[in-house]
Amino acid sequence: LDLTNKYETNKLNFKTIDGIIHLAGLAAVAPSYDQPIEYINTNMGIEVNLYEAAIKQNVRPRFLIISSGTLYNPRSKLPLKEDSDVEPSSPYAVSKLGQEQLAHYYTSRGFESIIARPFNHVGPGQNTGFIVPDLVEQALKVKLGRSKKVLVGNLSAKRDYTDVRDIVKAYRLLITKGEPSNTYNICSGESVSGEEILGIILKQLKIKPDIEVDSTKIRPVDAADIYGSYKKLHDATGWRPTINLEKTIKDVIEDCSKRV
């Protein structure tokens, strides 16, 4: 089903749906700098199609709109909270801010909508195009003797990483326990640098490859340190992260080793 096509989206039987956890869209930040209109049209357009299809069927399922922690102004005081200043730094983030505004609009059309702002996801099953699977795949090739070096971008930047399995648990809790018209951060509450991530990967694989900076992997805008607070989410649902980064990377290595 192509959710960018309103006619196909209208084929969904919304009368059998109590809640929608809306994740469909373009998710990688880096390509959005070269494809801004595709990101904005796709991410906002799909959401419009879903709400409008429900309206046509005269039903109002609850929506959980998955936004992003990348919306926040990186110069704001840390940890970033739901009321911290917003300043999108990529077309991807702009599209997510647009999705939030659409959710607010459709509240006036009778919908209960909750907004989740997950920070960086990581975990088994994640495709390349994100830092952990990119580094793991390259490191595995070194381990297998197919390469001698690992190409990296800006590894000094620190980000807030949460295992995708913990994030999914948060979504499940929010769709049932979240307060309509509220926004919730989903994050670990601490930041880790790319250097630390690479160090964990190399330690687990027991290799010492050459490390080379690739300028094409460096983003036009890249804040030095970002991490959030999940207190509001914990207070509403009892959620807290349970899977540490070492365990996550171990599972990513196991997953990627099946494909390399």
Image (tube, grey):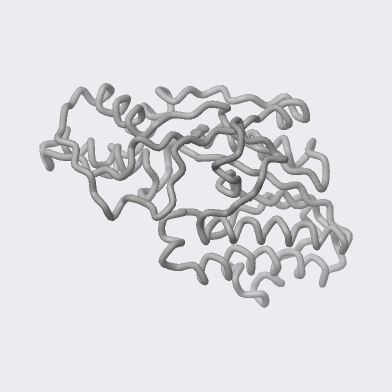
User: Foreground residue, 258 or 21?
Assistant: 21
Report x, y in % for residue 192: 43, 29
Q: Is residue 76 above or below residue 94?
A: above
- What residue sits 52% from the left and 33% below the top? 162
Q: Residue furthest bottom?
A: 7
Q: Nearer the viewer, residue 64 or 85?
A: 85
Query: Residue 31 vs residue 42: left or right?
Result: left
Question: Residue 222, position in %: x, y?
Answer: 43, 46
In the picture, which quadrant includes the C terminus? Answer: top left
Q: Quadrant of the N terminus?
A: bottom right
In the foreground, 9 or 163? 163
- Residue 95 is situated, as x and y percent measured from the top left of the image, at 59, 61
Residue 44 position by quadrant: bottom right
Residue 197 is drawn in which quadrant?
A: top left
Count of numbered marks: 0
Q: Residue at x 56, y 28 (%)?
A: 188
Residue depicted at x 23% and y 36% = 139
Q: Residue at x 46, y 54 (%)?
A: 29
**Residue 218: image x %, image y %?**
33, 50
